Amino acid sequence: MTFLMALRLEHVLYSLGGLFAAAAIIYFAWEYLVLLPRVIKTALLILLIGVFVLVAHHLKERDV
Amino acid sequence: MWWQVLFWALLVPVLIVLGIIYGTNKKLYKLFQVLATFTYVITVAYVIDVFSLGRNWVLGLLVFSAILMIAMGYSLTRPRKQKKRSKAYLYGLGALLVVMLLLIVLGSLRSGLIRDEAIVQSLPRSVLVTEGKMPEQGFSVGSITYTNTFPLPIVSPDQYFVACLHDAQQDAPYYIDLQVRVNGKYRYEEYQEPFTEVMPGETKTLQLAISGAPLPVRPETVNATTGTDLYRQYDALLLASSSDTALSCETLVESKARGILILNRSISLTD
């Protein structure tokens, strides 16, 4: 009960948002990415590494 | 496809590491650094596995990865001067996302893929029930030819195939083993298996054949007076292809099937 009372609405919404995002990514990979050629998949993976690196740099710059 | 095993094997430890890192530092950027490293490892595994790289390429990739990781580790531990905040990373991020979107759209285009289908119009019922041996290559029921005129590889929309004996009255489809050969090479054991991509300028022919020993047709009833097994009378052999993994005889209806092979005679067999 104390846990539920301490639960803040924004945290619930963040969690729901995260779950929806994860579901969207999994569904997208399952239905769409599977039909892409291997070369495109490899290029997407390499670009994804770049996306993570840039996000990390951006957050680090702001000390987040 | 061992890269998938590696992915799932690493996923749980990576999630635990992410939890620990965030719990101790409360810094989101460290999580993205770990995610980038994890994605890199999976990319290397994917490239080695899917493209079946030779040993020189594998060795080169491993050495490159070792040097890259050591250099990254070294640069992360080195103290840096505080830079002014810039939007360059955000612009770079936007550019990468746009390129990713373009690649997905390009990879999904199938306008350059020319499909030519040649399915036989009829099939003797005897093929399904005789005790005679089938040819080693199976009994051919047709072929589908794909030619890629697009400058990028294209994955065929027909990735799964199914063949079923269909009874219009009783609506009880019966699965038939179907061999799929690509350019003459036998590829798959199952009747539903993915088809590979067609490279630019390449022509790929899928030969479809009913495979194996004489195909069984289930006994429906036994006639007590004559001692004859009456076998279920199937009206047609349905042959269908789809990009959908859910393709099955149960969900297949005649209107959706391509190349319907009509079998007119009823079957009554004795021992």
Image (cartoon, coloured by chain):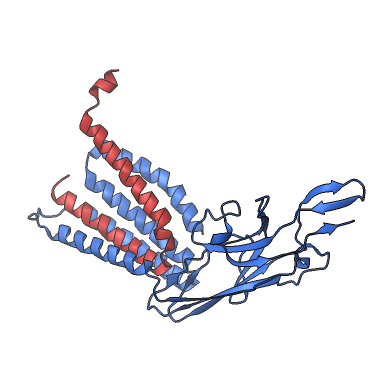
Chain colours: A red, B blue
Residue in the foreground of this view, choosing between B96 and B36: B96
Residue B20 sits in quarter: top left
x%, y% of residue B124? 74, 69
Quadrant showing the N terminus of chain A: top left
A42 vs B174, left or right, is left
Q: Residue at the location (22% across, 30% down)? A: A9
Q: Is residue A62 left or right of residue B109?
A: left
Residue B160 appearing in the image = no
Q: Position of residue B95 (x, y in %)?
A: 20, 64
Q: Is residue A9 above or below residue A45?
A: above
Q: Quadrant of residue A45?
A: bottom left
Q: Nearer the viewer, residue B270 or B69?
A: B270
A18 to B50, vertically: above or below: above
At a point 27% along the width and 41% down the height, the residue shown is A17
- Residue B10 appears in the picture as rendered: yes
Of residues B269 and B61, the one drawn nearer to the viewer in this rendering: B269
Left/right of residue B91 with respect to residue B97 in the rendered view: left
Q: Residue furthest left?
A: B84
> Is residue B126 positioned above or below B31 on the image?
below
